[in-house]
Amino acid sequence: MGYSNLPCQTASVCYSASMKIWVLNYLLAQKFQPTEPTLAIRIFDPNADAEKDGNSPARKLVDSSLWVAQLEYCFADIDLTLYEEESPETFHRLQRDERCFDSLMAKRLIADVTKHLSAVQHIMVHCNAGISRSVAVAVGLYQRLKPQHPEWEWEWARGRTKGLIKEESFR
C-alpha cells in the first residue's frame, strides 16, 4: 500500500495477507493515495472550528477512483464512563452537549463498513491526531470482522510511514 509517498510521521496499521486497516492523522490522510480499492473512514470532532482546525470535512482527501467510499462520522474524543460515578452533573452535561460515540453509532459504522467490505482491499481510518478515536474504531473493526474472516491473521504494527514499520503489540 502506497505509504512511501507520505511524509515521515507516525502511523499505525493492522494488516493481514489480504487486508490492511491504516490508522492515520488528518495530515497523512489528506496526502494518502490509495493504490488498491480502499474504504475511507473519516472521524471529525463536533467542537472543531472549520476555519481554525485542520481536521474538517471541508478538507478533502486526494482525488482517486480507488476510494470505494468515504464514510464520515463526528464524535467527541471523550469517555463518558469516567464521569458517570465521580461527577454525575458533568456526566449529564457531557451526555447532553457532546456528541459521544455510543452503541447506535457503533452499529451504524459496522453496517456502513460491512456494506462496502466486499469491494475493498484496505481500510483507511483517520481522525485529528490518529491516536485515539481512529485507533478505537480500527480495533473495534478488527474485533468485529475477525470472527467473520478466520483466514485473516492480523498483526498490529506502529512506526514510521517511511522505512521499516516496527512491530508493536496494542494488546
Image (cartoon, rainbow, N blue to C red):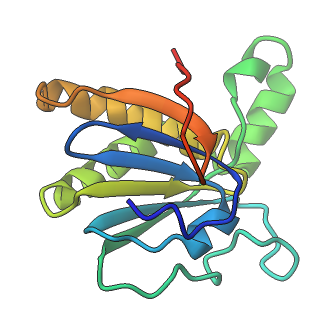
Q: In the figure, residue 87 lies in which quadrant?
A: top right
Q: Is residue 38 above or below residue 24?
A: below
Q: Quadrant of the N terminus?
A: bottom left
Q: Residue at x 77, y 72 (%)?
A: 54
Residue 75 visible somewhere in the drawing: yes
Q: Is residue 169 left or right of residue 151?
A: right
Report x, y in % for residue 159: 62, 39
Q: Residue at x 38, y 27 (%)?
A: 155
Report x, y in % for residue 19: 26, 46
Q: Residue at x 38, y 85 (%)?
A: 64
Q: In the figure, residue 119 lies in which quadrant?
A: bottom left
Camera-side residue: 16 or 4? 4
Q: Residue at x 54, y 41 (%)?
A: 164
Q: Is residue 154 above or below residue 160?
A: above
Report x, y in % for residue 114: 21, 51
Report x, y in % for residue 53: 82, 71
Residue 101 visible somewhere in the drawing: no
Q: Is residue 162 above or below residue 119?
A: above
